[in-house]
Amino acid sequence: MSTATISVGAAGPADDAPALPGACESETLGCLDAIDRLNPALNAILTVTGEAALDRARALDRERAAGEWPGLLDGVPVTIKDCFELAGETTSYGSVRFAAEGRHDAAVVRRLKASGAVLVGRNNLSEFCLGSTNQNEHHGSCRNPWNTTHVPGGSSGGSASAVAAGLCRVSIGTDTGGSIRIPAALCGVVGLRPSVGRVPNTGVIACSVDFDTVGPLACSVSDVARAFAAIAGYDPEDPNSVDAPLGNFLPALRDGIAGVRIGLPRNFYFDGLQPAVAERLREAAAVLERVGATLVDVTVEDAEVAQARTGFSLLVADMAQYHLDKIEAAPEAIGPEVLRRLKLGLPVSGVAYAESRRWLAGWKLRFRALFERVDLILTPTTPIVAPAIADAADMIEATKAVSRFTYGFGALGLPAMTVPCGFGAHGLPVGMQIVGRWFDEPLVLRAGAAFQAATDHHRQRPRLG
């Protein structure tokens, strides 16, 4: 992972010249300056940790100068979605009434610090991580840096917007039904949803304990891969954590995908797309084939019913149960749209919940069979580009529209990553979704790296002030 360097000439600076910042401090200063200039228009970051970030960056520069290696994220400016607990600090969870002071750092926060990351801020999000538009009744809506009249996606919208605008290099979000992948696609960045159990959820607010996971966003697959390596691993404090060896996959990140079989679904996932989205996906598939992959036509059985069968029986019931105390104690303190979504889970019966669990178990078996024929699956991440804020007033309908291709893979617990693959209507980004077998994130990342090595979509940046 490259960092900025400062050249002072062979003779060094004059004795009375001000000290030049080291690489970590320089990059951190750049991000803090971008936050100061651009965040008022984007509302992507709720809390800026400027002085603490600079102190941390300077300490890392001293460690590097002494010949020490701080870790995988050596001096990288990072933001985190404001749903992670931090010791002695208030986490908003996208709320006001239910914000709370943390007793301990979340497991992922501890791992970020141990890897040498520099925390520069905490990101805006949908209230309680519920919603795919990042319109927030309490903290104001986050905006898409490619066009500030459009949504950034959610619920990790602040993370995606901040990365795309250069307010940080890496951000950490959460994903249940698409909350990393949707905003990453709509903002033109890379976003990885790891397999459920690969990264600990300890100290993170829950949507659905069985489907939730934590993952990184960045402009490049290589930055995402390094951040993923830093935060992944078993945590005995997380009941859903899985002790699945990851190994050192980073040296093989650029080994290519010659001979890798990529399934292209011929049902559901390519239906009803905006024309430009369909064209970008055809072009992306051709690039992957050109760099060595073998494209395989596949049918994903029951894809069209997965969201309805699992989403409205499992996810809404899980959300309602988790937030039941808030619904009963202070419903007026919850945003109207979020409260409406939470209440959808209250009438779900135990019989309906059990039926959906059995249906999902059967769907997983069909995917195990599918992954005997292919190594990866390629789909659009969203069927549309980012909708205008005015068109996303109905949060439930907007969520259904943008999560159409993400929720099912989340319910399965599969690793999935969105990678920018061009632009569509109104010059807004289009993302492609690469889905792998359970716990095969290294191959998903290799495919994304191979695509980025052959294209320059990820190098495009929005033009802001």
Image (spheres, helix red, strand yellow):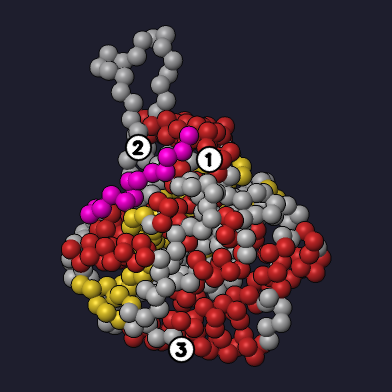
x then y, percent, for residue 436: 35, 71
* CB under 8 Å between discs 2 and 1: no
- Report how far apart the C-alphas of labels 2 and 1 lie in the structure: 16 Å
Which secondary structure is most common in the magenta stretch?
A: loop
Relative to residue 30, is residue 443 depicted above or below? below
x then y, percent, for residue 265: 33, 77
Residue 399 visible in the snapshot: yes
Please tell me which residue is depicted at 31% across the width and 15% down the height of the picture: 12
**Residue type pointed to by label 1:** Val
Relative to residue 285, is residue 366 depicted above or below? below
Mark number, residue 120: 1
Q: Given this view, does label 3 or label 2 mark the residue nearer the observer?
A: 3
Is residue 252 toward the left or the right of residue 71 in the image? left
Please tell me which residue is depicted at 32% across the width and 51% down the height of the picture: 457
**Residue type pointed to by label 3:** Gly
Q: Which residues are magenta?
A: 453-465
Location of residue 328 (image quadrant): bottom right
**Residue type pointed to by label 2:** Thr
